[in-house]
């Protein structure tokens, strides 16, 4: 801290300058404030330090993004193995047990094929949001691979051709594949409805509060609550109705060839 008269160095506790012997009592608060500001300015890092820190943070962010990409890739592989490969193997196992080991009615295999993929898709889409297109492609793969794999198992037993030999057999293959695909799609829809319901419950407290505020401020409050209830009902049951439709299609395509 410097004297305002002679600019000599002055002790923080001094009230008289030892060089010019002048009273600095009135200037003491201002001098302390100036000294504090000087300390703050001295503590500010230079532009070079800011650039180094920014570069360090950018490198850290790049490493974290790379780790997230790797984790996302392995998560994607795990989900493919669990929700596509496992049901595929289970369907092939069910086919082998029903048609080869026990040699029972084909309707049991069709029922298993319509029921088994559904819970896998349900728990997949219930856990978190997914992109539909990649999993739709996965559904097609699951359905076709299941039917072709079943045909291959049958060919090992009775030496029949793996691929369909006429239009009627191709039609049966497509219908059977469609029943498996629609079963998985039904699970996707139901799981998506469950996930959306879980997300909505987190927000309905805020929505309910906003509705009450709007109802108290507007004369048509009852109608606002009615519209909100209608929208909530449509969100809850709309996906379920569509899922029931896909279930019906799955049952029709799966049992048409046997019961028809």
Image: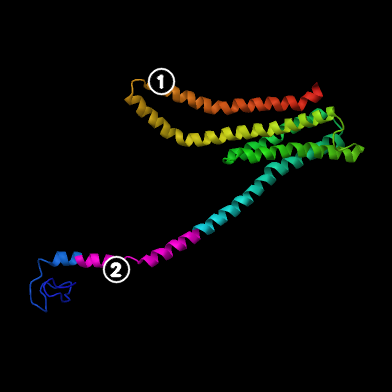
| x and y, in percent, of residue 188 in the image | 63, 35
Answer whether residue 46 is magenta in the image.
yes
The segment highlighted magenta reads 34-60
Give the CA separation, mark 2 to mark 1.
63 Å
Q: Which mark is residue 130?
A: none
> Which disc, if any, is residue 42?
2
How many neighbours does mark 1 have within 10 angstroms: few (below 14), some (14-19), or many (20 or more)?
Answer: few
Q: Is residue 76 left or right of residue 46?
A: right
Tag 1 residue = 223
**What residue sits 77% from the left and 31% below the top?**
174
Q: In this image, 119 relative to 15: left or right? A: right
Q: Quadrant of residue 138?
A: top right
Compared across the picture, whether 186 is left or right of 8 comes to right
x and y, in percent, of residue 62 in the image: 52, 58
Is residue 104 located in the magenta-colored stretch of the structure?
no
Residue 229, percent from left and from top: 46, 24
Task: Tell me the quadrant of the picture where the C terminus can be found.
Answer: top right
């Amino acid at each position: 801290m410097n004297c305002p008269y002679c600019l000599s160095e002055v002790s923080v506790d001094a009230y008289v300058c030892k060089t010019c012997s002048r009273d600095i009592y009135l200037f003491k608060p201002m001098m302390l404030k100036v000294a504090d500001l000087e300390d703050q300015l001295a503590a500010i890092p230079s532009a070079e330090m800011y650039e180094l820190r920014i570069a360090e943070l950018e490198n850290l962010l790049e490493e974290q993004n790379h780790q997230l990409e790797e984790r996302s890739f392995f998560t994607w592989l795990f989900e493919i193995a669990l929700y596509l490969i496992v049901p595929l193997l289970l369907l092939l196992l069910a086919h082998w047990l029903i048609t080869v080991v026990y040699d029972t009615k084909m309707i049991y295999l069709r029922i298993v094929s319509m029921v088994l993929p559904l819970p896998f898709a349900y728990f997949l889409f219930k856990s978190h949001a997914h992109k539909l297109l990649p999993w739709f492609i996965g559904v097609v793969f699951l359905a076709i691979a299941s039917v072709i794999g079943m045909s291959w198992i049958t060919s090992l037993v009775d030496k029949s051709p793996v691929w369909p030999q006429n239009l009627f057999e191709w039609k049966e293959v497509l219908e059977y594949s469609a029943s498996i695909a629609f079963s998985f799609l039904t699970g996707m829809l139901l799981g998506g409805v469950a996930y959306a319901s879980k997300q909505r419950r987190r927000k309905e407290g805020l929505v309910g509060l906003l509705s009450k505020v709007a109802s108290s401020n507007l004369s048509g409050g009852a109608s606002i609550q009615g519209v909100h209830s209608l929208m909530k009902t449509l969100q809850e049951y709309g996906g379920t109705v569509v899922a029931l439709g896909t279930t019906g299609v799955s049952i029709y395509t799966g049992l048409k060839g046997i019961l028809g």
